[in-house]
Structure formats: C-alpha cells, structure tokens
Image (tube, grey):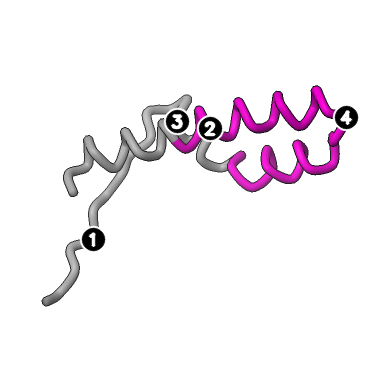
Amino acid sequence: MTSDQAASLVSLALDYTTHRTKLLRSQQRDEDADAISQEFQEWQLAQRHNLNVQICPLNA
C-alpha cells in the first residue's frame, strides 16, 4: 500500500465517521456520536494539517 492509498483510506474512514455521527445525532444518540468523534479526533486534527502517513513494510 502506498502512502497515497493509506491517506485515501483514512479520508474514507473520516467521511464515514462524519456521516455516522450525523445519523446518531439525528436519532438523539448524542453519547454514541460523541464517542465516535472522540475516537477519531486525532485523525481529524491531523488531516486538517496534512496528515503525514508513513507506511511500515511488513517483513515476509
């Protein structure tokens, strides 16, 4: 996986969390929405500052 592919996966995960959080809030499940937001807060903050993804190769 390239760093661009990894960054794309992170972006997709953050998009999913945004949509999931909105859905939970619309169902008045604020505690669940807050939990998801807190879980991905570090990723969200990093993405705003050009998330630097470093790939760690697996030893075969």
Front residue of this view, candidates 38 and 31: 31
The residue labelled by disc 2 is 16
Q: Pointer 1: what residue?
A: 56
Query: Residue at horizontal 88%, vertical 29%?
Result: 28
- Asked if the residue at tag 3 contacts the one at tag 2, i.e. Cβ–Cβ closer than 8 Å, the answer is no
Dot 3 alpha-carbon crowd within 10 angstroms: few under 14, some 14 to 19, many 20 or more: some
Secondary element type, mark 3: helix
Mark 3: amino acid: Gln
Q: Residues within 10 Å of mark 1 (few under 14, many from 20)?
A: few
Q: Quadrant of residue 51?
A: top left
Figure check: 54 above or below 58: above
Judge depth for marks 1 and 2 and give the one in front.
2
Q: Residue 49 or 31: which is nearer the viewer?
A: 31
Of the two numbered discs 3 and 4 in the rendering, the one whose residue sits closer to the viewer: 4
Q: Nearer the viewer, residue 2 or 33?
A: 33
Q: Decide which of tag 2 and tag 3 comes sooner along the chain.
A: 2
- Residue to which mark 3 is pinned: 47
Q: To which quarter of the image does residue 24 belong? A: top right
> Disc 1 to disc 2, how far (Cα)?
25 Å
Does the segment drawn in magenta span residue 17? Answer: yes
Q: Which residues are magenta?
A: 13-41
In the rendered structure, which disc, 1 or 4, sits on the residue that comes first in sequence? 4
Q: Earlier in the sequence, mark 3 or mark 4?
A: 4
Q: Earlier in the sequence, mark 1 or mark 3?
A: 3
**Label 4 belongs to which residue?**
28
Q: CA distance from mark 4 to mark 2?
A: 18 Å
Residue 19 percent location from the top left of the image: 61, 26
| Helix, strand or loop at mark 4 | loop
Gap in angstroms between the C-alphas marked 2 and 3: 14 Å
